[in-house]
Amino acid sequence: MFSYRHGFHAGNHADVLKHTVLIAALRHLTAKPTALTVVDTHAGAGLYRLDDGFAGTSGEAADGILKLATALRAEDAEPLVRDYLELVASFNRAGSWKVYPGSPFVAHALLRAEARDKLKLFELHPTDIHALETHVAQLEAGRMVSVQRADGFESLKALLPPPSRRALVLIDPSYEIKTDYAKVLNAIQDSLKRFATGTYMVWYPIIPRPEAHDLPRRLKTMANQAGKPWLHATLHIGQEEARSTPGEPAKRPGLTESGVFLINPPHTLKPALQKALPQLLEVLGRGRGQSQTVEAGGG
């Protein structure tokens, strides 16, 4: 159950997609003065080093944030991409890309103390929850941020609807356990009953597993039946030719494609992503099968 560590994948192409969309959604939601509650059901460690530890071992950031930061100047980037790069850069010294903020720190960077915004973080991994608590303590954010070692799927129920009736919920489990797909669907269905106007964002890996391909279709059906608008975006960086050292086992290709699905997305998100995703693909794409999609409907 606790084999997955997001540290191995921090800053990869899937994080680029997820956090670009998350930043755009939060920019829109925090434009209104009313307090916003953000819930991250699978928060991870919060902050990651890209030059050592898990991320340094996997090297996945080289095909994600590091490749993007090297290839694009801020003035040449599409607005969503520029916003993403600038936010990640704010966690680093000028010209350095050693620290990568996970979703909790991306969210915290955009929330407002004066509006009494709240950030609710949940994590079960015994090592990651300790790291998360340590990182959050350094923020000295007081009551704005709460951290619990608890099941995010179950804990979400007690938080909806929030007092201000405004919330963004991010659900991005590891999906290493096949039942996570069903848990995501159940959580969204239950959440829509409790708080129909919340913004719900689901990240998922696109892999050769039936549940992975069923998930966006079932989320789309759920949103349509509830009469809610939805947006679905995917990024496939392509399949690089696998190379291995003679005498060693062939390297596994790793994750090459992921998607995000939002219910009640900001109305500005689709046109902005239609400009941003082609640029992300142009920079991050490699090998066979490159693609990006943005579709929206419902409501």
Image: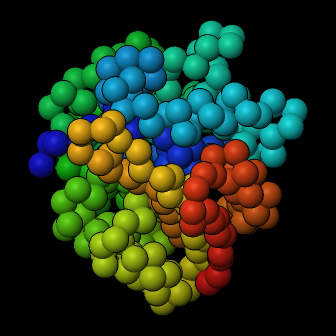
Q: Report the residue that reaches farthest toward the front.
A: 246
Toward the top, the furthest residue is: 93
Q: Quadrant of residue 60?
A: top left
Work out whether residue 193 or residue 179 is closer to the camera in this orientation and state it: 179
Residue 82 visible in the picture? yes
Q: Does 185 sit above or below residue 111? A: below
Q: Nearer the viewer, residue 239 or 141?
A: 239
Image x and y of residue 175, in percent? 28, 58
- The correct choice, above or below, for 66 with respect to 184 in the image is above
Compare residues 37 and 262 and report the one nearer the observer. 262
Q: Quadrant of residue 133?
A: top left
143 w.r.t. 218: above or below? above
Q: Nearer the viewer, residue 33 or 245?
A: 245
How far across and how far down the image is residue 121, in percent? 35, 39
Query: How many dots with numbers?
Result: 0
Residue 123 occupies quadrant: top left
Tell whether 89 sits left or right of 4.
Answer: right
State the residue at coordinates (35%, 41%): 244
Residue 46 placement (x, y as % from top left): 39, 30
Residue at figure coordinates x 24%, y 39% from the top left = 248
